[in-house]
Image: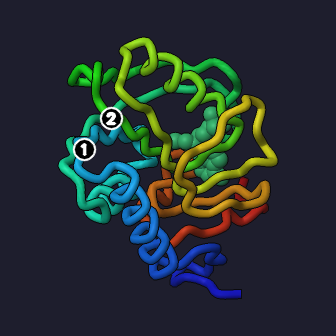
Amino acid sequence: METDNHGLEILFSREQIAERIRELGAEITRDLAGEKLVMIGVLKGAAPFLADLARAVDIDATFDFVAVSSYGKNNRTSGAVKLIKDLDEPIEGKHVLIVEDILDTGITLTYLRKIFLQHHPRSLRIATLLDKPSRRLEPIQADYVGFTIPNLFVIGFGMDFAERYRNLPDICLMPPEAT
Ligand code: IMP
Ligand code: MG
């Protein structure tokens, strides 16, 4: 078991994450060659992923951000999602890529996809750093997935437990005794 300097078990190291994001960036660059792209980050967890992914795509891209709140315990989505920060710029007629940290139950991204589609983008894709398909409650898939993981609670590289640990450079396992 590899641990970081806080003794946390590392699931994906910063090097593994960087390599995978380079691959995703190359894939997105191929899929959208010659097009313009609006990358929409879901605050706050997706901020580090968006920053790195944006620099891994060789495309004329702009950024926007949304924030959602979800009601639930243990930092997980319960079912009710509310938009607490909307888009700054219209996305009508544009190629859009939603950038998210984790696709878990799918409730958040199902909600965002629905409201973004109401704005008639030219295309709408989803990139998620992590995917936990075993937890899915809504039928939704991402177009670009960094890593698929089992039902584990992870922290670091943007992901939090009660707002902490977002700045860990590696993706680590939350120690079960701490949750
Ligand atoms: P969903 O609506 O259940 O798909 O919720 C996804 C959101 O739940 C993610 O954007 C995270 O904010 C949060 N989440 C789900 N699993 C984890 C985890 O293992 N660590 C940290 N946050 C998580
Ligand atoms: Mg999140």
The first of marks 1 and 2 along the sequence is 1
Q: Pick whichever, 164 or 169, lies toward us.
A: 169
Left or right of residue 161: residue 138: right
Quadrant of residue 171 within the rendered picture: bottom right
Residue 66 at what x, y percent from top left?
36, 30
- Rendered image quadrant of residue 124: top left
For label 2, count other residues whose C-alpha is less than 10 Å away and answer few (under 14), some (14-19) or many (20+).
some
Q: Secondary structure at mark 1?
A: loop
Q: Residue at x 75, y 58 (%)?
A: 152
In the image, the residue with mark 2 has its CB under 8 Å from the nearest atom of ligand 1: no
Q: Nearer the viewer, residue 172 or 31?
A: 31
* Residue under the point 46% across and 39% down: 125
The answer to whether the residues at label 1 and label 2 have Cβ atoms under 8 Å apart is yes
Q: Is 70 drawn above or below residue 146 in the view shown? A: above
Amino acid type at mark 2: His
Looking at the image, which is closer to me, 77 or 106? 106
Q: Which numbered circle lies on residue 35?
A: 1
The residue that label 2 is drawn on is: 95
Q: Residue at x 73, y 31 (%)?
A: 139
Q: Amino acid at mark 1?
A: Glu
